[in-house]
Amino acid sequence: MKRIGICLVVLLTLLLNLKGVGLRVVGYGEGQEGTPDNPYVITTPQELQDMNLDLDACYVLGNDLDMTDFSWEHIGEYGDPFVGELNGAGYEITNLTLPIYVTNIFEENVFAAGMFGAIGQNARLYNFGLQYTISALNIETGDTSIMVGGLSTYVEGYYDIDINNIWVDGDIELSTTSTFRYTSVGGIFGEVYLVEHLTALSFTGSIKVDAENSGMGVGGIVGYGEDFSINDSRVFDATIETGASIDESGVAGMIGWAEYYDSYLSDSDVIFRNSVVGTTVTSGNYVHAGGLVGIIIDDDDNDLYATRNYVEDVIVIGGRGVGGFVGYSYYMDYIRNEIKGVDVKICDDFSQEFGDGYLGVGGFVGYSLADYIRQLVISETRVGLGGSVNRVGGIAGTSEDGSYRYIDFSGEVKSTGDRVGGVNGLSLNTDIYYAFVNAVIEGDSYVGGIIGQSNGWDFLSSDSFVGTLTGYMYVGGLVGEKEGDILEIHSSYARGTFTAERVVGGLIGLSLGEVLIVQSYFAGTLDKQDSVPAGGFTPSGSFQTLIDPINCSNVEVSLVNVYFDNTLYTGSSLFPDTGYATINFKDVTSDVAGSLGTDLGFDGDYEFFLFSGLNDGYFSLWGDRNYIFFISEEEKIQMQLTFGRILMEGTDEFYNPNVKEYIYWEYRILPVVIERTGFVLKGWSTDALGEDMIDEDTYYFEDNTMLYAQWTESLPDTGVASKSGLSLLILALLGLLISKKKD
């Protein structure tokens, strides 16, 4: 009997140590070895759970799995992660309930949840769907953190990991009765480190976190991540909701908080071709909130790019930096991103208890520090929504040390606070080139078509604002107010109706710092709601009585080839108390505009001219964003360019799990409509002679394509044209007969 007992003990010991050697305690099917060529086939919930027995094996789903009533235990954990392969073969895991458990991560106690506890280097997971629920209410934690991710609590890949083509439908609800140290919650991953390939991931569902904490990262795909990249992924029809925080926090549709230290990903697209559609992001005071990213920081200036991402039909509410794309951004490059139909506003419980640091509400970014933004299109977007907050902009609430190129914003920017602008609410040391804003903008003070308040060395070139501006004081067509350092404006214009109770200017509301304006103009109406006449300074020079077609100022302003259009300006004389002559747009003699001739004096390229008196010209498409510019020619005509733009068109469809494919949007030109007195626009051609006419409905242009307007003469349809032609023919015949008779 002793020998039998000893044999049983030895046999049991061997069986318990067979993990990873091809022989299994549980059966996955006879002959299966868990290798890449011969993986274990999972056909039952228990077989899925038994992945925990061999964390470096290869698995494949053999069918859909319904996990209803199955008591799940996470696969792998921090320090002993899953490093094998799971091929979903297109199947789905549904009705999985994930419990909260306590573990140790980074030598700290953590409340965690996830299908996987941890995924590590060399792991491969792909091609399956997951539907889960996580619910943990009234957690009592003390000095503990939370880390929750539907697919995995924690991922650390050392740049050798592949997770792709996974679609997730999740429902997370967490609440606590005490203050947490930190909270990381993601619809797919709680925290991610050193991962180069997160590809084709999809999340829909809801995430609700009601917890007081000292900081959090909450996102539809990633809660918090360091040194990772994500591409071709999307969040759609999701609701992400958190409360307030007592420390810096990031909440967003896709990534709560992303931070980069390592140079491994330098000069690469870390956020590429992703989308967030039909999603609501709601958070409380002191939380940075964004449509796609809450907080993103490049700590080491690694030249990291967020490129060709798309946000549509999204609501973003936050309490610090709040943006349609990102709440707070530091040292990032953004290229060819688009936002459409997004509402961005401050939270209802917003307070200034933490001061103005990193505060702002923007159509793209709430607070931007040293960012480079180019080829950005924002349309049908409402920013501020009338909430009481300072620093509200169509692009950035606050921009510091930034650089913008080719910016297109259309929508509304409204706040009952100060510093409200079509591009930046507050701008410090930012240069803005080729920004086109068509918007309704409202604020209390410091309201501008491009910048609400310029408080650094700002540079504007080839920028334009078209729309309405309304404010109490310091309202300007391009800049509401200028303080400190230098403001330069080149080749820019403002058109529309600008209204203020106290101080309003055609280009600048009020300048208290050095200003240079070159080759720029205002055309429109300035309306001062108070009873002050339309004139320059009153004898007292009070800021309460200023209205000026260019710039209200008590400091010297340099003007070179600066214009305004009297035909659209109220009153027959702009300066009745100063003796200035009435300004005629085509015969400018005023000292205000300098000594100018009728040729307008423009040397450069101008985007979207919208006034009469221009020369004939052609339209040039610059770069792959396909912007349009007017370049004057020698022949003078009466031409009016009616409102039109070139926009990006295409589908908003992305990864579809049912058909297992992607559809990307394309870029298409929409030519503007122009009018010329006595002529009819025949169409557009790619050559000056009109031999290569284009089909405006279907034509797609390559980069740097040149378009030429082609005209035909227009005569009234009264028969005059035919009679004139007949008369000319008769005269010609008579002349011929007389000539022959003389011969």
Image: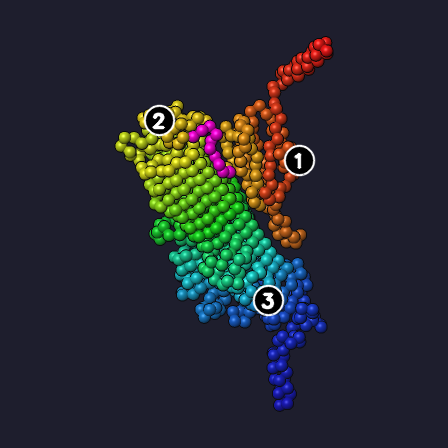
Which quadrant holds residue 44? bottom right
Mark 3 or mark 2, which is nearer the start of the sequence?
3
Q: Amino acid at mark 2?
A: Tyr
Q: Judging from the image, what secondary structure is the residue with disc 1 in?
A: loop
Q: Which residue is mark 2?
A: 580
- Count neighbours of disc 3 (C-alpha within 10 A) and say few if under 14, some if 14 to 19, many if 20 or more: many
Residue nearer the viewer, 356 or 724: 724
Q: Amino acid at mark 1?
A: Asp
Q: Judging from the image, what secondary structure is the residue with disc 3 in?
A: loop
The alpha-carbon separation of the residues under discs 1 and 2 comes to 50 Å
The alpha-carbon separation of the residues under discs 2 and 3 comes to 77 Å
**Is residue 143 toward the left or the right of residue 675 in the image?**
left
Depicted 676 relative to depicted 24: above or below: above
Quadrant of the drawing holding the C terminus: top right
Q: Please tell me the numbered disc located at residue 692.
A: 1
Give percent across and percent down for residue 282.
Answer: 46, 50
Q: Judging from the image, what secondary structure is the residue with disc 2 in?
A: loop
Q: Residue at x 35, y 42 (%)?
A: 514
Q: Are marks 2 and 3 in contact (CB under 8 Å)?
A: no
Give percent across and percent down for residue 67.
Answer: 61, 62
From where the camera sits, is residue 174 visible? no
Depicted 462 relative to depicted 226: above or below: above
Magenta stretch encompasses residue 312 = no
Quadrant of the drawing holding the N terminus: bottom right
Q: Amino acid at mark 3?
A: Ala
Magenta region, residue range: 596-605
The alpha-carbon separation of the residues under discs 3 and 1 comes to 56 Å
Q: Which residue is mark 3?
A: 123
Residue nearer the viewer, 565 or 588: 588
